[in-house]
Image (tube, rainbow, N blue to C red):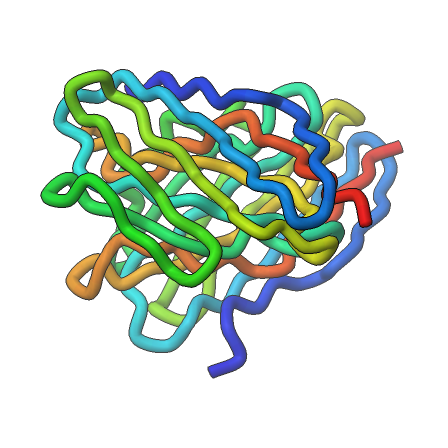
Amino acid sequence: GENVEQHPSTLSVQEGDSAVIKCTYSDSASNYFPWYKQELGKGPQLIIDIRSNVGEKKDQRIAVTLNKTAKHFSLHITETQPEDSAVYFCAPLDTGRRALTFGSGTRLQVQP
Amino acid sequence: DAGVIQSPRHEVTEMGQEVTLRCKPISGHNSLFWYRQTMMRGLELLIYFNNNVPIDDSGMPEDRFSAKMPNASFSTLKIQPSEPRDSAVYFCASSFPLRGTEAFFGQGTRLTVV
């Protein structure tokens, strides 16, 4: 199965700063790499994803970069805002189980 | 579309009682997933269905847990008998793989077994 490690577990930044969260995975055949955001009392919600045929994808203030050789991908949030405060999960596709395997989560706190 | 709908949102039950959690996936989605979230173990995949057929139930913790999907618009996760260590938030998610692998999650059911 897919082994997923996510770092850091907590991250505190000042409003306007950038935040980076990293995820490593073990399934070399994995071809789908999403990031989910979970707010208090809600289910995880997809914020950005990338497939193995590209190295970077950007959507306004968020971006994901993928290094398939090293088997890691990262979430980048620029110009952070207080509403970015939440728990973020990486969830690479486990090709054996054909389902997403979630990392342990990163609690991001953006200080106003 | 209303999204994935789970019920109840909260459930408090006594140890030994039967608990049934319900899920209505997004119309047209043909894959349905049940996840459990706890502080200690994070988000774990329990079971998933494709076209109403269980594909992988290796995450189901014990025989006390069972899941069914009698039709494309409804699924249940049952715990019988329930134990305090089953206390967690249970999420249902659905996806339509032919259009991508994005999983859409419901709001979850917070289960407390006392």
> At 82% across and 35% down in the image, what residue appears?
B113
Instruction: Return the residue nearer the eye: A101 or B91.
Output: A101
Number of numbered tags placed on the structure image: 0
> At 60% across and 53% down in the image, what residue appears?
A43
Q: Residue furthest bottom?
A: B1
Image coordinates of residue B82 in percent, x first then y, are 72, 33
Using residue B71 as the reference point, say whether residue A7 is left or right of it.
right
Q: Quadrant of residue B18?
A: top right
Using residue A99 as the reference point, say whether residue A29 is left or right of it.
left
Image coordinates of residue B43 in percent, x first then y, are 55, 33
Up the image or down, B29 lies above or below A109; here it is below
Up the image or down, A19 lies above or below A45; here it is above
Q: Quadrant of residue A110?
A: top right
Image coordinates of residue A15 in percent, x first then y, are 71, 48
Up the image or down, B85 lies above or below A48; here it is above
Instruction: Return the residue nearer the eye: A112 or B83.
Output: A112
Image coordinates of residue B22 in percent, x first then y, are 58, 59
> At 27% across and 53% down in the image, what residue appears?
B101
Using residue A7 as the reference point, say whether residue A100 is left or right of it.
left
Q: Is residue B76 visible?
A: no
> At 63% across and 40% down in the image, what residue appears?
A87
The quarter of the rendered structure image containing the N terminus of chain A is top left
Up the image or down, A110 lies above or below B4; here it is above
Q: Is residue A81 visible?
A: yes
